[in-house]
Amino acid sequence: MDYTDTETFGTILDRTATREKGNCFEDFSEGDRIEHAPGLTLSNYANELWASQTLNHDPMYWRTDAARAAGFEEPPVHPDYLLAAVMGPTVEDLSEKGGYFLGRTNVRYHDQSVTPGTELRVSSTVESTATSSSRPEYGIVTWETEGKDAETGDPLVSYERTNMIPRREPVATDGGESAAADGGDADSGEGDADDTPPSEFITPDGDRFGDFAAALDAAADRDAAVAYRHERGRTMDDVMVATLPLMTLNTAKQHHNVDVMADSPSGDIVAYGDVTRSVALGHARSDEATYRELGCDDERFHTFVTPGDTVYGFTRVVDAEDTHDHAGTVTFEHIAFNQHDEPVYSGTRRALIQQ
Ligand SMILES: CC(C)(COP(=O)(O)OP(=O)(O)OC[C@H]1O[C@@H](n2cnc3c(N)ncnc32)[C@H](O)[C@@H]1OP(=O)(O)O)[C@@H](O)C(=O)NCCC(=O)NCCSC(=O)C[C@](C)(O)C(=O)O
C-alpha cells in the first residue's frame, strides 16, 4: 500500500493516535518538583539577537569598556535573555499543552555577571493549583522556578509564574475556588477607592536617579504623578513572535504553529510574554541610566499580541530611595500597550539607577 497517496494518507491519519506533548492541569499537584531536562547553554548569538531585537541596546551588554565602567569584567548576558533562557526549557514540562501565560511575580536576579557559555539547570515546584471559574476547560497553575549555573550550582534567577493549563475533562465550577492562584494582584483596578487620574503628569528632567527623585518630590504635595510615554515602538514580526521563543527552547505552540492557532481565540500565533515584556522594558531603559536590575513583581499579560501589532511603553515612577553612593533604587510601574492604546503587559520593576 502507498502510504503517501493523499486519499489513503488522509484515512490513515484519521485512524492513528497522536503521541502527545506536554502535561494537562490534572498532572500537577501542589509540591511536585520537576527537573527540566533540556536546559541550554547561554549563547552570544541568542543573547545579541534577543537584546538587539527587543531594543535593549544599553552599551554595558555590548561593549567591554561600558561593561567595565559598570563593574563587570566583561559584557554579561542581558537579564531579559537570561530570564527567558531559564523559562524556555520549562515550557515542555509545564505549559506546552497550551493555555495562556497569565502573569509572574517575585522575579529576582541573583547574579547578573553571567556570561555566554554558562550552562543552565532549571527546576520548578508546583506552588498551587486552582479551578478557573470563567473557563471550565482550563485550570490555573502557579510554579516556582529557579535557574542555576549547572557547574557551580549558584542561583541565577528565580520567579513564580501562573498559567492557564488545559484540563483533560472540563469541570463544573461554582466560581469559588479560583482566586488569584499566586496571591498576586489579580485586581484590574476596577472598584479601586480612587480611580480618578491625577490632574498633572510630571516627566523627569533626565535619566539619573536624582532626576527621578526630584520629579517625585515635585509631585509629592500636588495632585500629580510622575509618568510618561516612551517614543519608540516595536512591530512584532516573525523574529519576535516565533524565533526568539524557539531560540530559548520554548516549545509553546502559541508562538510558532499558525495552523493550530488559527482555531484559537487569537486566530493567530501570539508573542511570547517575555518578548512583549522585554520590549516594554527596553523602551523604559532607553530613558534611564540603569545600573542593575533588582526584580519584577505583579507582571500581568492583559491581552494577546499578534504579528503586526506594535508594542509601545509607558512608565510611572513609584518610589526612589537613595541606597548606594553610585546608584539609587527606583521602583517603576511599566505598561506595554499596542497601537490601539490597549495595555498588553503591566508589572512593577525595581532597578538601581546611576546617581
Ligand atoms: C488569558 C485571557 C484570555 C483571560 O482574559 P479574561 O479577561 O477573560 O480573564 P481574566 O479575568 O484576566 O483572567 C482569567 C482567570 O485567570 C485568573 N488570573 C489572571 N491572572 C492571574 C494571575 N496573575 N495569577 C493568578 N490567576 C490569574 C483570573 O483570576 C481569572 O480566574 P477565573 O477564571 O477563575 O475568573 C487574557 O487575559 C489574555 O488574553 N491575556 C494574554 C495572555 C497572553 O497573551 N500571554 C502571553 C503569551 S502566551 C505565552 O507566552 C505562553 C508561554 C510563556 O510560552 C508558555 O506559558 O508556555
Image: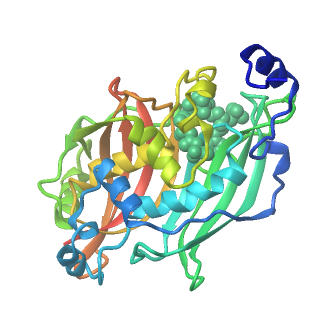
Viewer-closest of 48 and 279: 48
* The N terminus: image quadrant: top right
Q: Position of residue 42 (x, y in %)?
A: 47, 68
**Left or right: 85 with respect to 55?**
right
Viewer-closest of 322 and 245: 245
Q: Residue at image x 57%, y 57%? A: 87
Figure quadrant of residue 337:
top left
Relative to residue 229, is residue 281 depicted above or below?
A: below
Q: Position of residue 39 (x, y in %)?
A: 61, 65
Q: Residue at image x 17%, y 59%? A: 207
Residue 185 visible in the current orientation: no
**Left or right: 107 with respect to 235?**
right
**Left or right: 30 with respect to 347?**
right
Q: Position of residue 282 (x, y in %)?
A: 31, 51
Relative to residue 171, is residue 141 depicted above or below?
A: below
Residue 130 visible in the current orientation: yes
Q: Tell me which image quadrant ligand 1 sits in.
A: top right
Q: Residue at image x 61%, y 68%? A: 146
**Left or right: 20 with respect to 83?**
right
Viewer-closest of 282 and 327: 282
Give the mark count. Answer: 0
Q: Position of residue 316 (x, y in %)?
A: 31, 47
Figure quadrant of residue 325:
bottom left
Viewer-closest of 315 and 57: 57
Residue closest to the far front: 1
Relative to residue 206, is residue 339 depicted above or below?
A: above
Residue closest to the far top: 7
* The C terminus: image quadrant: bottom left
Q: Residue at image x 43%, y 59%? A: 81
Q: How is the image coloured?
A: rainbow
